[in-house]
Image (cartoon, grey):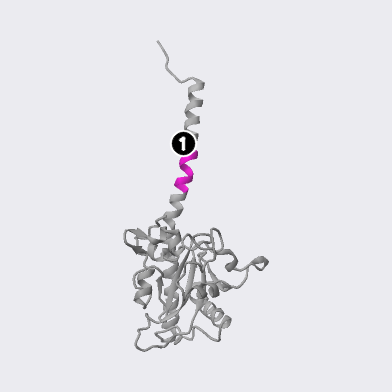
Amino acid sequence: MKKFGFTLAEVLITLGIIGVISALTTPVLIQNTGTAQVGPKLAKAVSAFEIANQNMMMEAGAETLDGANAFVGDSDDDVVNYINNLSKYMKMSYYKEIEGGQVYSDMLKNYNNESPSTGAPDSYSEYVTGALDHYGLSKDGFLYAIHPVEDSGDVTLSVYQRFRGLVVIDINGLAKPNKIGRDAFVFAMYADGSLKPIGGNGWSSDDELNSAYNWYSGSSDKCNEEAVTSGWTCAGSVLENSQKVIY
């Protein structure tokens, strides 16, 4: 009776082929898995921030952040106070510098590895620069860099139309890549504590600006066009595209 089996050479060749295939496919699988986590993590970070603002205002019986005394003082003082107030509702710690004196502004780059303000709407570039020296780290590992601006108090606009500042959310905290449109996303914050993703529909009360920075233009996603907005529209792209990342 004949016995059938594999020779040692055949086994080694088969294992070698499996090894090559694994080496080729594993990085892709890891990347796809990481990309699939971006949308849910960003949605969670946004939700936690907005809920904290809502709880802060509810406790104060106010309909705006200013009515809840979320901000006190000017420049550095108001953002420190705001982050400390948020920490009561979302377990956030305030930081200005990390070990060695390096601030987040030295770490964050845009889509093209340039200054994070590059590609920003003209009137918003200064806001992101101002936000990055002050940030809070939540217990979930999210980083919130915040630059509040004065509420216009325009009674012709509802509280969710009155721009109150810029928020950069880094879903990886201080870990790399620290790039806008990759792990850091830019939002407009309004007087009622809500966040609107830049690049999303209706993120600005300025129709012309909103149109210019809408994430979907024609037949392409601006988040995937590096030269267009350098990652600034990616927040809108992710949150209005079933939390999918297109790049």
Q: Secondary structure at mark 1?
A: helix
Q: Is residue 114 left or right of residue 6?
A: right
In the picture of the structure, the residue carrying the numbered disc 1 is 21
Quarter of the picture holding the C terminus: bottom left
Q: Is residue 210 left or right of residue 107?
A: left
- Residue 188, magenta (yes or no): no
Near-viewer residue (62 or 185):
185
Q: Which residue is the extreme one toward the left?
A: 218
Q: Which residue is the extreme one toward the right?
A: 100
Magenta stretch, overall SS: helix
| Part of the protein shown in magenta | 23-30
Near-viewer residue (66 or 107):
107
- Residue 27, magenta (yes or no): yes
Q: Which residue is the extreme one toward the top?
A: 1
Near-viewer residue (163 or 142):
163
At horizontal 34% and vertical 88% (from top left) the residue drawn is 156
- Position in image of residue 158 (x %, y %): 35, 84
- Position in image of residue 63 (x %, y %): 39, 85
At horizontal 64% and vertical 67% (from top left) the residue drawn is 102
Task: Name above or below for residue 157 compared with residue 137.
Answer: below
Task: Name above or below for residue 191 compared with residue 142.
Answer: below
- Position in image of residue 90 (x %, y %): 49, 72
User: Badge 1, how many Cα within 10 Å: few under 14, some, many 20+?
Assistant: few
Near-viewer residue (119 or 245):
119
Q: Is residue 203 visible?
A: no
Quarter of the picture holding the N terminus: top left
